[in-house]
Image (cartoon, rainbow, N blue to C red):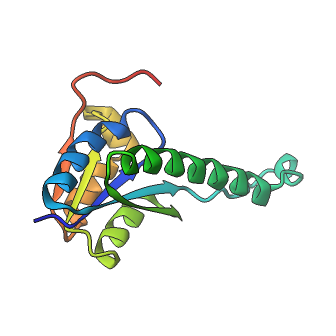
Amino acid sequence: MYTRILVPLDGSKLAEVALPHAVTLAKQSKGTVVLLRVTQPVTAMVMPEAAYVDWDRIQAEIEAEARAYLADVSARLAAEGLAVQTQLKSADPAEAIIETAKTGGADLIVMATHGRSGLGRWVLGSVADRVVRAATAPVLLIRPAEMPGE
């Protein structure tokens, strides 16, 4: 039923609580798990003392770390016999998830919620909420039973 399952990851253990659910569904359907890591672009702040910062180098380091993370998670899933693909994007997280699902033909998006409510959600916004409202594919949200430590 679900042949392409998109799993957005932010590099945290919290986001990885979605993986067992995606793995189970992918095994049942012999589907592919697509791991997506979205980094937000690093931009120079409007501050005179920030002029000497090498923003391109910082962005490259962030992307290298994200690639290494994706390779690690991908290897773990491949060891379980799953077909896995990885994608790295630098953009607004919700927009990147929605666009990747649409253009990549995802049948399902499986992602963790960060469990914010009230003022925290209002101030910080909710990637999961934005994805649920705008995605064209079904979205399975996993709320962790306990917040894993970072």
x, y percentage for residue 79? 39, 46
Describe residue 21's horizontal placement relative to residue 80 as left or right. left
Q: Nearer the viewer, residue 31 or 111?
A: 31
Percent position of residue 105, x then y: 27, 75
Q: Report whether 94 appears left or right of 3.
A: right
| Residue drawn at (63%, 55%) of the image | 63
The quarter of the rendered structure image containing the N terminus is bottom left
Residue reaching furthest to the left = 1
| Vertical side of 55 occupied by 21: above or below | above
Q: Residue at x 21, y 57 (%)?
A: 132
How many numbered circles does the render carry? Answer: 0
Q: What is the x, y in percent for residue 47?
A: 79, 50
Q: x, y (%) of residue 102?
A: 29, 75
Residue 45 visible to the viewer: no
Where 101 falls versus 39 (above or below)?
Answer: below
> Is 111 rendered above or below residue 147?
below
Looking at the image, which is closer to me, 125 or 91? 91
Choose top left, top right, bottom left or bottom right for residue 120.
top left
Figure quadrant of residue 3? bottom left
Regarding residue 135, the answer to whether it shows in the image is yes
Q: Nearer the viewer, residue 87 or 113?
A: 87
Q: Return the residue found at the far bottom.
A: 103
